[in-house]
Image (cartoon, grey):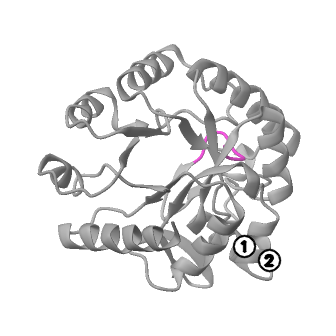
Amino acid sequence: MIKLGIPMLKSSYPLLEAGKLNVDYVVYYGQAGLENLKKVAQHGKPIYIHDLASSFWLNYVDPFKPDVMDEARAMLDIAQSPWLSTGIGASAEPQAHRDGPYREADADQLQSRETVTENIIAHGRRLQEFAGIPLLLENFNYHPTNAYEYICEPGLFSFLIDQIGCGVLLDLAHARISAHNMGWPDSRTYLEAMPLNKIREVHITRPGWQGDQMVDLHQPLQADDFDLLGFVLDHAPVEAVTIELDDTDEQTFLDQINIMRSYLAARA
């Protein structure tokens, strides 16, 4: 049976405290820090660690700062996560969220394809060795902002995964966004070019629109969102599905969990 989880957010943590979460695990974003993780861990629900500190990017020249890695080791020791997941990396250093729901960088901050490839492979291997558990790298959502060049190409993404020797966390909304914004015929064609056989976890949410660009808004799922999920589950060895909502009301969280729980049970 595929496991089901949701992220720990300001609006989902009270549900964990109240024992209302009918999920198999919770996802903890590493950017939230060690002290908040300790609060989550005391409730006994399995924890999957996603991302490290906000400064940690595999494409950066040196993301392995001592304070970042000390905190990462402490978080992994507390969570006992079955794997560590983080993004594949960006294409600029630095880059950040500015005005929209995506990352941006100036033209002079854009790295070359060669630099991005070399850094991600070297740092991905080092991170996997550091973690001591399987590493899953997440695909990103393409926007023409200098932060997402190269890395959203299925061919390069697959090459990086193969060279690092790690698994994949497929963000389904990211894949849909990249397919649309990069001009692929459709999302399924894009997904077919990805390393489906390496996927162990799926993040799913509903994307939205900003002009003619599809964007990552982490909206509640609707019926048609399950079509692509079904395709992925039919073609990949998925072990866990995370509903990656942003902060929302209690009933929406509970309804989304119940819908996904029923969907996964029907497939079992």
Circles 1, 2 touching at the beta carbon (< 8 Å): yes
Query: Is residue 183 shown above or below 89?
Result: below
For image coordinates 73% across by 76% down, the residue present is 188
Q: Amino acid at mark 2?
A: Trp
- Dot 2 crowding, Cα within 10 Å, few <14, some 14–19, many 20+: few
Horizontal side of residue 266 vs 56, given as left or right:
left
From the image, give the main secondary structure of the stretch colored magenta. Answer: loop
What label does residue 184 carry, if any? 2
For image coordinates 77% across by 33% down, the residue present is 164
Toward the viewer: 251 or 127?
A: 251
What are the residue bounds of the magenta stretch?
89-95
What label does residue 23 carry, if any? none
Is label 1 in a helix, a strand or a loop? Answer: helix
Toward the viewer: 22 or 165?
A: 22
Horizontal side of residue 172 vs 112, given as left or right:
left
Is residue 114 in view from this perspective? Answer: yes
